[in-house]
Image (spheres, rainbow, N blue to C red):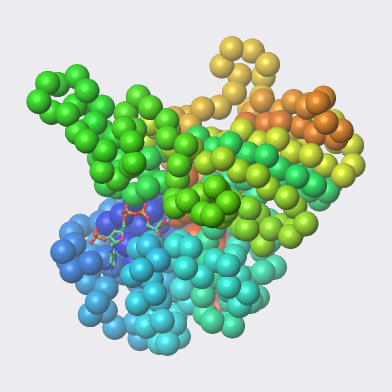
């Protein structure tokens, strides 16, 4: 007997990847249900070599569902997550609605798997922001060895992080620049994104930071250690999938770059590609469809004591969202729900 599992937002960027990853990893499910809005009812969603017909979340009966992976944004989550949890379903949510609540664990399985035990307080587990997820995978093994004091990060975030409409905007705007009469004005983004970069993701806060930047600060503290100081600048760039980050890390204890590289090579979820030659590093297009967080350009920062810099790239729809959510579901099944037989590979 396996799990009955829902993917809410199955027609979206993240939901589609959730279905792909559940199939790829042979999640032990007896039933997988694809949900979205009424307008998507009947839409066929790929699930391995099968297709699932999308159902309307508004009229869905949650009875008997064990877990639900949500990727529908904060507003709709506020409506539907309580319906699911009331029926006994555990919600693994990708929106920011519950991330900062003390009674909701915020989990990256390679980093803080033990937090899973807290799921029962509300039957809700939160998935971090895409930029945070890949960064904490890289930071945790280094923090364990040399205690991180401060992180300064600049992101280069792909448009898929803003949903499927944002991907369409980049595509149409890029074509429109070359075809007279087909110009495409900025709508999802605040300025032209084609052939441009925009230093603004989320909403502006009183201190001049944006909410996306604040999320990286608050989530790193919640997932790894509240003593870590983070200063972030989040930038949207005209790539479709894959977020990159330039990260500067200052430690309490000495940690030379070559030793940091050795630690990262052994760390879960990480692949180090770092040859000091043309092309000896990873770029976003090369990480699309992959599970790993890739690290390149590891080097000493001699301008301050005990510091290094590195380049971190991952598929934002996978480790930044869908893969992390499926890994949480696996962890929940293995450690807490323990339903049915667990496959060896699981
Ligand atoms: N993209 C990323 O890298 C990333 C990373 C981490 C977290 N997230 C979070 O994941 C969530 C989904 O992001 P996305 O990129 O997949 O967005 P998306 O491509 O725009 O897809 C949105 C999905 O939500 C559904 N939806 C929209 N309004 C709804 C409503 N009122 N009720 C129920 N379902 C509704 C849509 O269904 P229809 O097709 O029927 O409209 C669609 O399936 C967001 O909370 C986002 O912040 C995204």
Q: Residue at x 22, y 36 (%)?
A: 185
Residue 115 in which image quadrant: bottom right
Q: Position of residue 19 (x, y in %)?
A: 36, 57
Foreground residue, 279 or 122? Answer: 122
- Answer left or right for 173 relative to 92: left
Foreground residue, 22 or 136? Answer: 136
Q: Quadrant of the N terminus?
A: bottom left
Residue 174 in which image quadrant: top left
Q: Quadrant of the C terminus?
A: bottom right
Determine the residue located farthest toward the left in the rendered image.
Answer: 181
Foreground residue, 182 or 326? Answer: 182
Query: Is 326 situated above or below 56?
Result: above
Query: Is any atom of residue 100 visible in this view?
Result: yes
Query: Is any atom of residue 2 visible in this view?
Result: no
Query: Is 276 situated above or below 75?
Result: above
Q: Residue at x 55, y 27 (%)?
A: 282
Q: Position of residue 291 (x, y in %)?
A: 52, 44
Ligand 1's image quarter is bottom left
Q: Position of residue 256 (x, y in %)?
A: 84, 30
Q: Residue at x 40, y 87 (%)?
A: 87
Determine the residue located farthest toward the top in the rendered image.
Answer: 278
Please state the total of marks drawn on the protein image. 0
- Answer left or right for 53 relative to 264: left
Determine the residue located farthest toward the right in the rendered image.
Answer: 253
- Answer left or right for 272 relative to 292: right
Q: Position of residue 310 (x, y in %)?
A: 68, 31
Q: Residue at x 80, y 34 (%)?
A: 307
Query: Is 49 situated above or below 41?
Result: above
């Amino acid at each position: 007997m396996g799990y009955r599992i829902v993917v809410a937002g199955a027609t979206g960027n993240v939901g589609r990847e959730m279905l792909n990853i559940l199939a790829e990893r042979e999640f032990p499910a007896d039933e997988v249900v694809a949900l979205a809005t009424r307008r998507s009812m009947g839409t066929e969603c790929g699930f391995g070599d099968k297709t699932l017909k999308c159902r309307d979340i508004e009229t869905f009966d949650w009875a008997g569902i064990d877990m639900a992976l949500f990727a529908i944004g904060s507003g709709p989550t506020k409506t539907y997550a309580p319906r699911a949890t009331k029926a006994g379903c555990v919600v693994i949510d990708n929106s920011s609605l519950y991330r900062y609540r003390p009674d909701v664990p915020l989990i990256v399985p390679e980093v803080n798997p033990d937090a899973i035990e807290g799921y029962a307080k509300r039957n809700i587990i939160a998935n971090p922001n895409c930029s945070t997820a890949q960064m904490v995978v890289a930071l945790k093994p280094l923090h364990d060895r040399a205690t991180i004091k401060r992180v300064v990060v600049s992101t280069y975030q792909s448009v898929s992080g803003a949903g499927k409409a944002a991907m369409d905007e980049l595509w149409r705007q890029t074509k429109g620049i070359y075809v007279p009469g087909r110009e495409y004005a900025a709508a999802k983004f605040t300025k032209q994104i084609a052939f441009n970069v925009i230093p603004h993701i989320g909403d502006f806060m009183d201190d001049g930071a944006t909410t996306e930047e604040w999320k990286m600060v608050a989530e790193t503290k919640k997932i790894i250690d509240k003593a870590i100081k983070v200063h972030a600048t989040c930038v949207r760039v005209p790539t479709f999938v894959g977020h990159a980050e330039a990260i500067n890390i200052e430690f309490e204890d000495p940690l030379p770059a070559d030793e940091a590289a050795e630690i990262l090579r052994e760390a879960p979820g990480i692949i180090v590609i770092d040859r000091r030659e043309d092309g000896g590093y990873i770029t976003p297009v090369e990480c699309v469809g992959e599970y790993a967080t890739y690290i390149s350009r590891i080097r000493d920062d001699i301008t301050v004591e005990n510091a290094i810099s590195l380049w971190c790239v991952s598929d934002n729809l996978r480790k930044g969202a869908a893969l992390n959510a499926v890994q949480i579901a696996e962890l929940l099944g293995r450690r807490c729900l323990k339903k049915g037989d667990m496959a060896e590979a699981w």
